[in-house]
Amino acid sequence: MNVLWAHDHMFYYNESGRFYSGGKLPYKVWQRYLNVFDRLTVVGRGRKLPADADSAGKTLSSGPNVEFLVLPSLSNPVNKLIKKGYVERMLSEAILQADAVIARLPSELGAEAVRLARKFGKPFAVEVVACAWDGLWNYGSVQGKLYAPFSYQKTRSLVSQAPYAMYVTDSFLQRRYPNKAGRVGVCSNVEIAESPAEVLERRLAGIRGRQEEKPIVFGLIGSLNGRTKGIDVALRALSRIRDQLPPFEFRILGDGSQDRWKALADRLSLGDAVKFCGVLPSGQAVWEWLDEIDLYLQPSFQEGLPRAAIEAMSRGCPVIGSTAGGIPELIGEECLHKPGHDRQLAERILAFAGRTDALAEQAKRNFARSADYVKTKLDDRRQRFWQSFRTYAEQTGENLAPLEAIDRERREMA
């Protein structure tokens, strides 16, 4: 069975036809689907890499039984006018050749894939991974705020009517985007390796034996492109309380240009305390980086369920985060602040920084909670959901699409 998967994710490709992701969609993610389906056609946005481009910081997304279809973005008004027809033609051809469609929402390409799947009678499922309203309303532009209610309602409608809907949160996205009639699954798109008990033991020993003269290390993982991870919120919060804290460092791990954030740090008189760590390979290198963080910050404007926060929790790291998306499902109320409220984030930081008992309690709680996202636990749940969808697609796919409608569409495109 060939399944088409669609989302607005940006892939990078070179002359040899190899596709890379900025980190979120390596080939191992496609293997989750290939455990059930035979082939996958991945639809997303694309950017060609120069011949001499360095692929450091990117993960290989290409692999056996996975093909890519690069389409223009439909996320801006100009492209919606001049490129919508091309996207519809190319996506229609790909969907007609597929047996079923999986759309990751919110996304413009995902929404278009659902519309065309319904038009051609193709079985489809949706993956709900974030909130359309949060992403656009907090995007920082007038255009984003104006489009937020339309995207929100469109996503609600698509999810409501889907025969299969997979959510990455336990309750947040389900409340905002309820599915009324289909089969619903809950499975985080974040999965981590199981951490041995020694990780927590080392963390607790470090908290209790910490020397006062040693700087407190705050950490954040996220792309430097855009505002969604709340880097500016963290910088402003730390600037507010700099004189009330012992010496500290704020380390940021992520891809993208550092220039705007360095400039902001300098304006806030934090330039000497902020360290940009670039990009590290996933796995051991990131774990070692997190082991050096005393307090992890996740002041996001938009999230589904943040992988970085869960990884930090798996290393026994205390976490302070915003109320965006599914973050409140991970950490306690005393660790939360409203998105964009740097004053409230500063208060939360002061409440924990240097408090041995509070930090140790959060370390133990977070380490235990992270066990819910161990790969072995999620694989079985995810596979049962997609196996059910495959059975549904096999039983209904051929009967749902009138052959004359398909033939007519092919003639129109020709």
Image: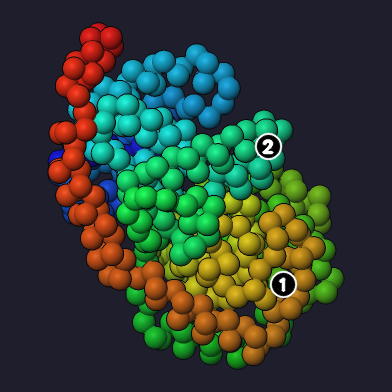
Residue at 47% over, 40% down: 157
Image height of 143 relative to 408, above or below: below
Instruction: Residue 366: tell me if it is visible.
Output: yes
Tag 1 secondary structure: helix
Image height of 265 relative to 363, above or below: above
How far across and how far down the image is residue 387, in percent?
20, 54
Question: Seen from this angle, which residue lies furthest front?
Answer: 181
Considering depth in this image, is 300 or 121 the residue closer to the camera? 121
The residue tagged 1 is 349
Three-letter amino acid code at the position of disc 1: Ile
Residue at 62% over, 65% down: 321
Three-letter amino acid code at the position of disc 2: Lys
Residue at 76% over, 65% down: 344
Tag 2 secondary structure: helix
The residue tagged 2 is 145
Image height of 82 relative to 153, above or below: above
Considering depth in this image, is 149 or 134 the residue closer to the camera? 149
How far across and how far down the image is residue 27, in percent?
28, 48
Residue at 56% over, 57% down: 325
Give the CA separation, mark 1 to mark 2: 30 Å
Instruction: Residue 297: tell me if it is visible.
Output: no
Quarter assignment of residue 413: top left
How far across and how far down the image is residue 360, in percent?
58, 86
